[in-house]
Image (cartoon, rainbow, N blue to C red):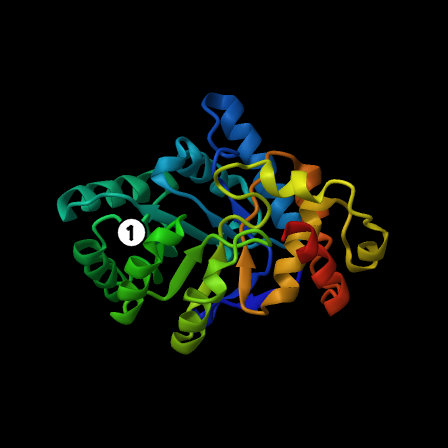
Amino acid sequence: METRTLGRTGWRVSEIACGTYQTFDVAGRRGQEQVLALMRANLRAGVNLFDSAPMYGHSEANIGAALPALEGAGECLIATKVLQSSLEEAKRQIAHSFSAIGGRIDLLQIHNMAGWREVLPHLAELKAQGRIRATGVTHYSSGAFGEIEAALRTGVADVIQIPYNVAEREVERRLLPLARELNLGVLVMTPIRPLFRRGALLDRLKGLELAPYRPFGVSDLGSLCLKWLLSQDPALVLLPATSRAERVASNAAVSGTPPLPPELMRELERRIA
């Protein structure tokens, strides 16, 4: 797995990391075993960042249960979020996240920009105290990009997490130029499927001839979407989420291959236009 520098954090992060929305939200012993197996598969593939949130149900607790059993867990990065409009509620939620994950959070992000004017300065305090290593902001909707821009202009956030794929490209006009200007890390939350109308992107690509893309590690439409993003911008770190270990391996296979040539990039984009 190739790595990329996550902006001004200086961290070398696997260019394909691990999102946990829905896939790590499994209850009980079965959930713990499933997440442990998925985290092992990711680590074997070279993934070194796992992104969670309290709103992802059992994800944080399952990660916390898995970490002591994982060889190399100390070298991976754990990201999570806070989603509360008041500072006091945010503090309580953050404390719960620390407890669930086992006392360790590397990157703490404002989820959906909730209460960011109050909460983001508190994240800066936690960073200054050494309790977290980096701060971030995130939202799934382009309607919130104005709020994200305002938050980034404060200079507090180190990382943004954004919706981006071959069918969702508003970030190219607004957020990515600002991220480059401020040397921010960029995590991509929807590299294969939009959050809503989840089947729409892959449905529009059905029938696309994959043979020209296979030399670049592409084995299916999902890995093709990942490769398009990796070829589009060398600063991006992608967060696909899967509950299948074999999918982890097929996703990772696009890392380390040459960027897609312009003609193949444009062919894919024409199918979406």
Question: Crowdedness of circle 1 by 10 Å Cα count: few (<14), some, many (20+)?
Answer: many
Which residue has dot 1 on it?
113
Q: Residue at x 64, y 53 (%)?
A: 226
Secondary structure beneath label 1 = loop
Furthest residue to the front?
273
Residue 132, horizontal then vertical, whole percent: 32, 58
Instruction: Judge whether 247 appears above or below 174 on screen.
Output: above
Q: Nearer the viewer, residue 197 or 273?
A: 273
Res 55 seen here: yes
Q: Residue at x 41, y 77 (%)?
A: 181
Q: Nearer the viewer, residue 193 or 205?
A: 205
Amino acid identity at mark 1: Met
Furthest residue to the right?
211
Res 258 seen here: no
Instruction: Judge whether 61 appears above or below 16 on screen.
Output: above
Is 163 left or right of 121, judged from the image as shown?
right
The quarter of the displayed image where residue 262 is located: bottom right
Is 121 left or right of 9, judged from the image as shown?
left
Instruction: Judge whether 86 appears above or below 270 on screen.
Output: above
Residue 123, horizontal then vertical, whole percent: 25, 58
Q: Residue at x 53, y 39 (%)?
A: 69
The total number of labels drawn is 1
Q: Residue at x 27, y 39 (%)?
A: 96
The quarter of the displayed image where residue 254 is located: bottom right
Residue 63, horizontal then vertical, whole percent: 46, 39
Quarter of the picture containing the N terminus is bottom right
Furthest residue to the bottom?
181
The quarter of the displayed image where residue 258 is located: bottom right
Residue 173, horizontal then vertical, whole percent: 46, 67
